[in-house]
Amino acid sequence: MNSAMNIAVIIAAAGASRRYTDSGGLRSKLDEDLGGKPVLQRSVEIFTKHDDVKFIVVAGPGDDAEFAEFKSKHADRLGLLGAAIVKGGKEHRWQTVKAAIDAIPAEAGGEKITHVAVHDAARPAASAELIDRVFEFARHHPAVVPGFEVGDTLKRVSQSEAPARPSDPLAAILGASASEEKTIVVESTIDRAGLFAVQTPQAFTIDVIRAAYAQVDLSSTDDASLVEKLFASEGKGRKVVVAPGDPRNIKVTRAGDLPLVRAIMGLRGPEERPAHKRF
């Protein structure tokens, strides 16, 4: 493959943060403070330091009111970083990424865009070394994802009809409703052999990612899975390649993830900083 690379970066930022708020988060995870800057800004900034990146587009919420609020919070900061903002999807991640792909120009800064990298807005701890590694692999392969072997034991589970905790007789007497929490039970243990945890950024030649998103069935868990479908339909033996990932590149999904990200990045929350330096 041609080693020349001019990359457009897509930051997928349309998620509703439901798991984050359900687990105790008080606001959108992308608005949370990382050393005086929101998570979203940190996730965009890491790409501005790479010379191969020629264009950055952030895809926000698909709902009109939510998108307007998103822009009011982030447009000024993202504009200073040179990032464009587009409205993403209302229901599915693929809708968000497709909207961003459609917004990528043929050229940026006089350079023809050759590759697209897609990154989760909630992964602000992706290191420069990881991004460089993914981009270097992308010089030689049409589709690259960062990943690493799964270390934890994996269990397939289901919900039991039995309550998770014994009912409280006193609560029943006082008229309190019974807990609706169900017991999670183990059905089987999954063999970890050959299993990798995959992260972002995921990088593709622009022709490959456009072709992947032109398919009829766009149901997917990530962008690479659409490319896998494309390659399988071609029958040419092409495969998505895995570059060494980084366990520190965690995604802020639940409220407990935020302190971990701060520790990884060496940043403090607002309550840990002097009042005049708080976000």
Image (cartoon, rainbow, N blue to C red):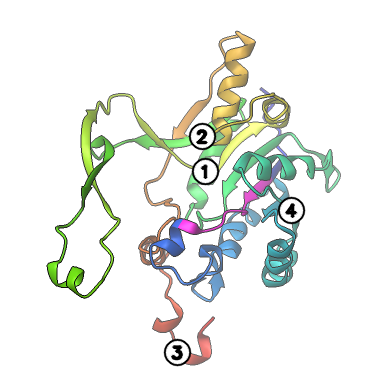
Q: Mark 4 points at which residue?
A: 87
Marks 2/1 in contact by CB < 8 Å: the verdict is yes
Residue beneath label 1, please? 200
Label 4 crowding class (10 Å Cα cut-off): few <14, some 14-19, many 20+? many
Residue 10 locus on image (x, y percent)? 66, 47
Q: Earlier in the sequence, mark 3 or mark 2?
A: 2
Closer to the camera in the image, 155 or 210: 155
Amino acid type, label 1:
Thr
Q: Which residue lies furthest to the right in this view?
A: 110
Residue 182, compared with residue 3, is above or below; it is below
Mark-to-mark CA distance, 2 and 1 = 7 Å
Looking at the picture, which amino acid does disc 2 mark?
Val
State the extent of the magenta-drawn residues as a range: 9-18
Disc on the earlier residue, 4 or 1: 4
Secondary structure at numbered mark 4: strand
The answer to which quarter of the image holds residue 46 is bottom right
| Quarter location, residue 224 | top right
Nearest the camera: 84 or 108?
Answer: 84
Of label 2 and label 1, which has the lower sequence position? Answer: 2
236 in relation to 258, above or below: above
In primary-sequence order, the first of circles 4 and 3 is 4
